[in-house]
Amino acid sequence: MNEDLEQYLSTSTKLDSIEVVWGEGTLPVKITTYLSSTLAPERYISSARSIVFKGNLVLLISQENGHQYILPGGRLELEESPLEALQREILEETGWTVTNIKHFSFMHLHYLFSKPDGFKYPFPDSIWSIFISEAVEYKPEMIIHDDWVDDSELRDIIEVQQLPLERGELLLFDEALKFREIRS
């Protein structure tokens, strides 16, 4: 691991760690979630995501297979900053513009496989920057339909806490609620 990434990880608070397998069972990845108000060195950031609030509501994403999650966002495009990617991805996926964007967490992905040909993301370590933000304006005409998002809706915070979300997402959600309280 490069020294600058190692330094960044060592100054952050570890929240959770899990090993998953992506790519139809061929791509093992160790995902460690941290709390940090500072961005990672940008050369490691491959994705920007946010827990999006609107008052006491939270933006919930549903996939066609029934899976639900609370971290809309996605990959950075060439020459795009994490904030630009975040705003673009949320608008394209959900139709919402966001403001009051604050970095509060990140996921460190450590790939446990050999680098495939054409792999265009930082390797063997990359970072998904995680923010909290507030939904401002809904623009349904801006939604670009794809395989990742079937639907999105604003749901009450208490309802979202009862959903069968991934453990890491629930931990992040609890931390995001605390972070919002501190900021208000």
Image: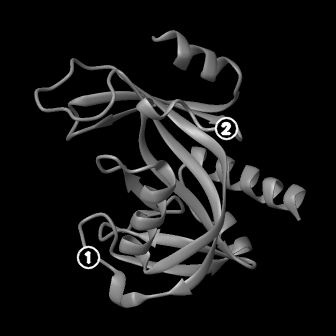
Q: What residue type is labelled 1?
A: His
Q: Which amino acid does label 2 sit on?
A: Thr
| Image location (x, y in percent) of residue 42 | 47, 35
| Image location (x, y in percent) of residue 27 | 25, 30
Q: Indicate the quadrant where residue 154 lies.
A: bottom right
Q: Which residue is drawn at 30% across and 63% down?
A: 148
Q: Which residue is drawn at 33% across and 75% down?
A: 150
SS under mark 2: loop
Between disc 2 and disc 1, the foreground one is: 2
| Image location (x, y in percent) of residue 24 | 20, 41
Q: Which residue is drawn at 53% across and 19% down?
A: 5
Tell which of 177 and 26 is nearer to you.
177
- Disc number for residue 98: none
Say left or right for 108 vs 99.
left
Image height of 166 relative to 40, above or below: below
Count numbered badges in the picture.
2
Q: Residue under label 2, please give it.
A: 38
The reply to whether discs 2 and 1 touch (Cβ–Cβ < 8 Å) is no
Q: Indicate the quadrant where residue 35 lies.
A: top right
Q: Residue under label 1, please give it.
A: 145
Tell which of 10 and 24 is nearer to you.
10
Image height of 180 relative to 128, above or below: below
Image height of 61 relative to 9, above or below: below
Label 1 Cα neighbours within 10 Å, binned few <14 / some 14-19 / many ≥20: few
Q: Residue at x 56, y 14 (%)?
A: 6
Say left or right for 104 vs 20.
right
Mark 2 or mark 1: whose residue is earlier in sequence: 2
Quarter holding the N terminus? top left
Quarter holding the C terminus? bottom right
SS under mark 1: loop
| Image location (x, y in percent) of residue 68 | 46, 65
Q: Distance between the residues labelled 2 and 1?
A: 32 Å
